[in-house]
Image (cartoon, rainbow, N blue to C red):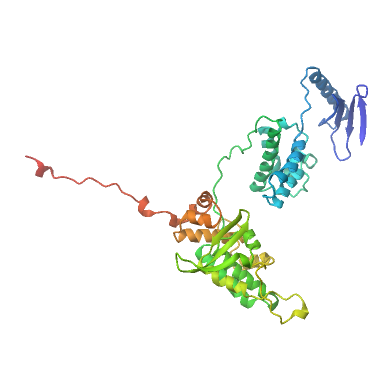
């Protein structure tokens, strides 16, 4: 690092090995202060450093130089508080996501700023910085610890980063260092287009389970057990509406086959453990037979000496051990069902969306669907009911005003 001193050794001008700009620093009011000169010339950098130092001296004498805490300070404070205050009610991965977003993106951009300088304009500057394609950005000016990929982040990624930013600013408000939150909503695009979530229409769903059934017969012996699991997974999920993470945590002791009093059908009553805590779900009759196959399917043999030994799942075993996503995606691609007509990729979550849409098409009560799926009526109306034609009542829409009957003037005249 190259370093020069000016103004009687009160100001230092230096340049790091990995930067083309000169930096300047000084010690004033018991604190080291530094900034970038944004100059490549040493002479211009020294002139900037002199003006910067004189400005700091003037603010110090006028009592305007405040030692305000930085964004990075409150980011560290937020991370220390968040996990303890939420008391384990948040997923460890979500807590870790806050730390990653702060370390990789937010701290490099906002970290050295005084907390009051994080304004609505600065947040908008951050959005533009993140959305600018890397080929159009100067690599030496990158304010991110993430390797360059050339692809701008998705809208949801930016949204999650702003959520983390808001939590840090709220931490500063609680500790009395910030009076109010700046405007964080994105300008110019206040209302986004509501896009329905990818699902399988009745015809596509039939095509899917026929494809999984055919694969159970054509799969090599080494993959036969996995193929059968995938087939029953598709039928089970589309008839229960569970989230993939809820199905992953599901054990055989959480499922009970019962005779429903209201309908007289045989259904499953499932004790669900997932993102909403513990809840209950009642399946359609179509989930019973797939579950019976899952419960009576011997576990795969891992050791050679256990060949020929049939071991059925016990009550504490997972209903869906392991992950079959690669096989599931392979079947989707071969059946040409991976993407819907809008180009949205279908995943195992699409089976939950299919369950909700099929129930709506059958005329089920939207409130009961929301309770059974552990979600809200608002979410269903926003993401599912908007594109289901059977939710529209033509008799209520095509109403005609009754016309008054015509009277015969000749008959009523005297």
Q: Residue at x 69, y 79 (%)?
A: 310
Quadrant where the N terminus is found in the figure: top right
Q: Residue furthest left?
A: 414
Could you say which is closer to the camera, residue 149 or residue 375? 375
Q: Image check: 67 left or right of 358?
A: right
Quadrant where the C terminus is found in the figure: top left
- Residue 309 location, quadrant: bottom right
Residue 337 at x, y = what percent?
58, 64
From what the image shows, is residue 228 above or below residue 104?
A: below
Residue 187 at x, y = what percent?
60, 37
Could you say which is closer to the camera, residue 277 or residue 336? 277
- Residue 115 location, quadrant: top right
Q: Residue furthest top?
A: 62
User: Is residue 199 in view from this perspective?
Assistant: no
Could you say which is closer to the camera, residue 4 or residue 279? 279
Q: Residue at x 75, y 42 (%)?
A: 80
Could you say which is closer to the camera, residue 342 or residue 328? 328
Q: Residue at x 75, y 31 (%)?
A: 114
Residue 193 at x, y = what percent?
55, 46
Residue 379 at x, y = what percent?
54, 50
User: Is residue 9 in view from this perspective?
Assistant: yes
- Residue 22 location, quadrant: top right
Counting labels gives: 0
From what the image shows, is residue 302 above or below residue 187?
A: below
Q: Residue at x 45, y 61 (%)?
A: 362
């Amino acid at each position: 690092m190259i370093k020069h001193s000016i103004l009687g050794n009160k100001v230092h001008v230096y340049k790091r090995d990995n930067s083309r700009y000169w930096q300047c620093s000084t010690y004033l009011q018991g604190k080291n202060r530094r900034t970038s000169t944004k100059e490549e010339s040493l002479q211009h950098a020294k002139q900037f450093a002199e003006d910067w130092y004189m400005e700091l001296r003037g603010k110090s004498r006028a009592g305007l130089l405040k030692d305000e805490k930085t964004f990075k300070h409150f980011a560290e404070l937020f991370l220390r508080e968040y996990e303890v205050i939420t008391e384990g009610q948040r997923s460890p991965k979500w807590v870790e996501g806050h730390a990653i977003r702060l370390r990789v993106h937010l701290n490099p951009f906002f970290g050295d700023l005084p907390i009051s300088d994080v304004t609505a304009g600065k947040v908008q500057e951050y959005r533009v910085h993140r959305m600018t394609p890397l080929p159009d950005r100067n690599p030496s000016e990158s304010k991110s610890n993430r390797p360059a990929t050339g692809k701008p982040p998705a809208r949801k990624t930016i949204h999650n980063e702003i959520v983390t930013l808001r939590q840090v600013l709220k931490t500063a408000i609680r500790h009395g260092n910030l009076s109010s939150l700046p405007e964080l909503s994105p300008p110019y695009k206040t209302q986004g287009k509501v896009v329905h979530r990818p699902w399988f229409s009745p015809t596509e769903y039939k095509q899917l389970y026929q494809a999984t059934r055919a694969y159970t017969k054509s799969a090599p012996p080494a993959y036969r057990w996995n193929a059968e699991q995938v087939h029953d997974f598709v039928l089970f999920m589309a008839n229960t509406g569970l989230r993939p993470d809820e199905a992953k945590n599901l054990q055989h002791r959480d499922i009970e086959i019962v005779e429903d009093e209201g309908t007289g059908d045989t259904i499953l009553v499932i004790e669900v453990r997932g993102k909403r805590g513990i809840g209950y779900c009642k399946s359609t009759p179509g989930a019973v037979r797939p579950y019976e196959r899952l419960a009576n399917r011997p576990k795969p043999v891992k050791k050679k000496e256990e060949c020929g030994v049939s071991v059925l799942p016990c009550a504490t075993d997972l209903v869906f051990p392991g992950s079959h996503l690669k096989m599931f995606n392979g079947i989707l691609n071969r059946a040409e069902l991976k993407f819907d007509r809008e180009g949205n990729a279908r995943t195992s979550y699409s089976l939950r969306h299919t369950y909700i849409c099929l129930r709506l098409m059958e005329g089920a009560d939207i409130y009961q669907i929301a309770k059974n799926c552990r979600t809200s009526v608002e979410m269903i109306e926003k993401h599912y009911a908007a594109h289901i034609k059977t939710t529209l009542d033509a008799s209520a829409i095509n109403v005609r005003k009754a016309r008054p009957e015509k009277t015969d003037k000749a008959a009523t005249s005297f």
